[in-house]
């Protein structure tokens, strides 16, 4: 029997995370993400995923130091970024820049946590360099007193970020660090399973992340909300879309058959942060209307908001440009991808499923 999209197929054993799709829970190394976002920083959560336990003070300081040490963009990456056409989308830019990093140092088999830290440190700087370049603004060198998330916002905007914005973005980035065998992580593990290098695995993952059914969904969410705001009738717009057979961006999930716990955490953070807000009110109205209409028109499919729906709202609340949504997701997911590639390398078997030939024999 064929399982289209490998639905329900268990392709690997992992110690990194666990998703309980029926009860809407996500665990990193056995810890529930809601607890992690409340008590720990981006760096602590990343350490947990890479090393399997939370860091003590010395270990945390060392990780922060290593992330800061690796933030400088190498000259060859800057030159390549300067040469890429302005029309090239940011995800393709990141993929290209990470490819170029592969030429600089030894990324041979097997992948290491040091390599993972370096690539994770580079991605926000690639995004910030490119974004400012396209805006005709000078690149802002990183500030060594700022941690990962604050420094990302600082290098993007060229000014010290608001504490509330850092907090909101940090919550989002912790929630999106890792998510089991999603399409991009699977891509990374498949590439690594040939004993290829970490750079190749990560560029494969970035290319997979880019698609609108995966990491590219938040811009679709903003378009949906903008359209509804314009028409002024959520039910009419959503019903028409569903009747035409269109998918609603930010809804549905392969694994969650109830509310995505990341969406719940992001919504709570947003309510806490912005309180009364016209746009957030609209998002909540669209959520309720869509869930009801999906239940009516797609009965039995258990469709709810996924992480992308409130990710879009959180990005909007912190004035993050639309083009940065998927790249920012990529910046956090670097941790999960690299952790998986390292795990794949530890106990490797090449991925090689089969395809059933359904053509004629001539
Ligand atoms: N809007 C309307 N209908 C939907 C939606 C949606 N967002 N999602 C699923 N459905 C319907 C499908 O049309 C299908 O109906 P059918 O049985 O009548 O054919 C049924 O629900 C099952 O859907 P599948 O697409 O088969 O579910 P699958 O597990 O393959 O896909 C996916 C999951 C890709 C996330 C899907 O729900 C989707 O396309 N959502 C919109 C895009 C999106 O928000 N992506 C971000 C996901 S989160 C992430 O990647 C970080």
Image (cartoon, grey):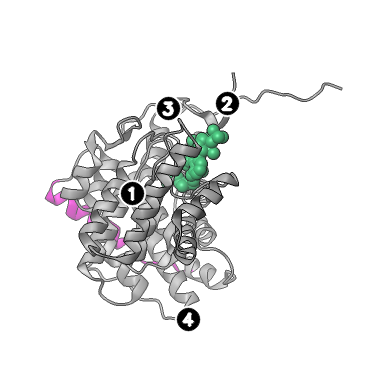
Q: Earlier in the sequence, mark 1 or mark 3?
A: 3
**Is the residue 83 above or below the residue 250 in the image?**
below
x then y, percent, for residue 57: 12, 50
Distance of label 4 from label 1 (alpha carbons): 33 Å
Mark carried by residue 353: 2
Mark carried by residue 136: 4
Q: Is residue 62 magenta?
A: yes
Residue at left offset 30%, top offset 54%: 172
Q: Could you classify mark 3 by the number of other residues whose Cα lies within 10 Å: few (under 14), some (14-19), or many (20 or more)?
A: few
x then y, percent, for residue 177: 33, 47
Q: In which quarter of the image is the N terminus?
A: top right
Q: Quadrant of the C terminus?
A: top right
Distance of label 2 from label 3 (alpha carbons): 13 Å
Q: Name the residue under label 1.
A: 114
Q: In this view, does 60 lie to the left or right of 22?
A: left
Q: Mark 3 points at which residue?
A: 12
Distance of label 1 from label 3 (alpha carbons): 24 Å
In depth, the one of 126 and 233 nearer the eye is 233
Which residues make up the magenta segment? 56-75
């Amino acid at each position: 029997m064929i399982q289209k999209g490998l639905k329900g197929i268990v392709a690997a054993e992992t110690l990194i995370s666990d998703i309980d799709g029926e009860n809407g829970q996500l665990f990193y190394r056995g810890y529930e993400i809601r607890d992690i976002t409340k008590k720990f920083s981006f760096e602590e959560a990343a350490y947990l995923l890479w090393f399997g336990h939370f860091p003590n003070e010395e270990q945390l300081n060392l990780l922060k130091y290593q992330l800061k040490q690796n933030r400088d963009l190498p000259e060859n990456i800057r030159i390549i970024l300067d040469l890429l056409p302005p029309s090239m989308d940011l995800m393709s830019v990141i993929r290209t820049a990470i490819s170029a990093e592969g030429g600089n140092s030894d990324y041979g088999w097997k992948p290491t946590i040091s390599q993972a830290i370096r690539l994770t440190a580079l991605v926000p700087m690639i995004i910030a360099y490119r974004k400012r370049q396209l805006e005709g603004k000078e690149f802002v060198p990183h500030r060594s007193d700022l941690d990962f998330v604050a420094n990302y916002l600082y290098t993007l905007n060229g000014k010290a970020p608001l504490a509330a914005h850092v907090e909101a973005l940090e919550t989002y980035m912790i929630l999106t660090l890792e998510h089991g065998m999603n399409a991009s992580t699977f891509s990374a593990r498949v590439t690594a399973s040939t004993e290829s290098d970490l750079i190749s695995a990560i560029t494969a993952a970035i290319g997979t992340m880019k698609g609108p059914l995966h990491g590219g969904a938040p811009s679709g969410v903003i378009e949906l909300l903008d359209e509804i705001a314009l028409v002024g009738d959520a039910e009419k717009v959503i019903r028409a879309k569903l009747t035409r057979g269109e998918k609603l961006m930010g809804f549905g999930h392969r694994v969650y058959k109830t509310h995505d716990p990341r969406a719940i955490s992001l919504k709570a953070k947003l309510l806490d942060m912005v309180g009364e807000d016209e746009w957030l009110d609209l998002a909540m109205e669209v959520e309720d209307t869509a869930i009801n209409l999906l239940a009516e028109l797609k009965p039995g499919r258990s469709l709810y908001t996924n992480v992308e729906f409130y990710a879009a709202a959180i990005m909007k609340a912190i004035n993050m440009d639309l083009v940065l949504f998927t790249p920012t997701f990529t910046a956090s997911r670097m941790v999960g991808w690299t952790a998986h590639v390292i795990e794949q390398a530890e106990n490797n078997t090449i991925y090689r499923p089969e395809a059933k030939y359904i053509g004629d024999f001539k």
